[in-house]
Amino acid sequence: MQGYNSLVSQPMSLGDCLSAGFTAFRRQWKPWLVIGLLFMSLGQLGQLWIMTRLEALFPNLAQGEAFDPSNIDPLHVSQYAVAIIGVVLLLWLGGVIYSGVSLHLARHGLTGEPTHWKDALREAKQRFWTVLGAFFMLYVLPYIALVVAGAVSAGLIALVNQLAGTIASVVVGAVIILLSLYLVLLLLARLFFVAEAAFVDKLPLSQAISQSWQVMAHKAGSWTERPLWRFSLYSVMVLAVGLAGYGLTLIPMTILSSMFGDSPNPFDPLAAFPLWARLLSGLWTGLAFALLTGLFKAASMAFYYDLRARSQGGDLWDRMQSLQQDTASPRSEDNPPFE
């Protein structure tokens, strides 16, 4: 495996990116775990409050009965809707801050720079609007593009149907839909590393967007080395790990459900559980999601370093190493080998 500092300058395989994410997470697991549990606990409290409001708003559903609109007070609906939207926004903003903390810890875990959880929170606060913009680029803009592409596709299909008939409209519609999906996925891939670029290269949002676009647009020698292809394989690999991790979060829920039965209340799936079982399930779920979020952020940060090395001087480290060989010195303890 490459030296610890060479990780940020030398291209890696996809397996090395995932391995680097594991190692970086292991080096920073304490602040990741503490801050992750804090934010996940706040998130679960927010979700619990929302469920209790919905339970009060729809008492018939909460008791397992049929929906009865006569029991709903329109004034309560508007009040609860405003409150729930506010809580959801607060949870979303908390997710933005936790993403900033994870990006800070991932960068320091990969480069070997010492850091503290206070430093992570401080940088997350400083780059809050940049991460918020990256969230918009990643989670909102592609869906807007998908809706626009769907509306345009529907109009073109209807026009072709009028001019050339059903068969032609089906063929043209299939081509348009596939092309639209490809363009939306391409947009998603090009904007995927905006937050990573902002934290690694200390860039404002506009320049981070340009940087993410450039590293994903780099033309490699063969198609298997193209960023889009590697990003697709990386996404599948991360999805597989994520599904495995999600499966682990369901283990205690399944065991406890077999012990205490299922809840008839759709707003409280743990209603049949005693207090200790609720706390155990919540702790396990929060711990799993905190660890998985940290791991994925570290892996995506390592993949961004790989893309940057390939597109902006992949042989830089090799040239530096060849120059240093003339005055080679023993490896310092501050630069341990990357495990």
Image (cartoon, grey):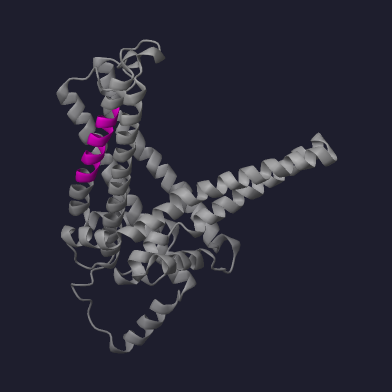
Residue at the far bottom in the pictured view:
326
State the residue in front, 246 or 50: 50
Residue at the far front in the pictured view:
75
Tell me what residue is drawn at x 19 percent, y 44 percent. 38
Relative to 110, say whether 159 is above or below: above
Relative to 279, say whether 213 is above or below: below
State the residue in front, 158 or 256: 158
Tell me what residue is drawn at x 30 percent, y 48 percent. 93
* Main SS, magenta residues: helix
Relative to 332, say whether 148 is above or below: above
State the residue in front, 82 or 93: 82
Task: Specify the segment rendered in magenta.
Answer: 38-51
State the residue in front, 77 or 9: 77
| Residue 137 falls left or right of residue 282 | right
The quadrant of the picture occupied by the N terminus is bottom left
| Residue 72 falls left or right of residue 190 | left
Relative to 305, say whether 61 is above or below: above
Is 258 part of what is drawn in magenta?
A: no
Q: Which percent across, then down, holds residue 302?
A: 37, 61
Asked if residue 339 shows in the view, the reply is: no
Residue at the far right in the pictured view:
164
Q: Which percent across, then down, holds residue 32?
A: 22, 52
| Residue 180 falls left or right of residue 111 | right
Tell me what residue is drawn at x 69 percent, y 46 percent. 176
Quarter-of-image position of residue 5: bottom left
Q: Which percent across, then down, holds residue 142?
A: 51, 50
Is 45 part of what is drawn in magenta?
A: yes
Tell me what residue is drawn at x 28 percent, y 15 percent. 261
Asked if residue 258 shows in the view, the reply is: yes
Q: Which percent across, then down, holds residue 16?
A: 39, 59
The quadrant of the picture occupied by the C terminus is bottom left
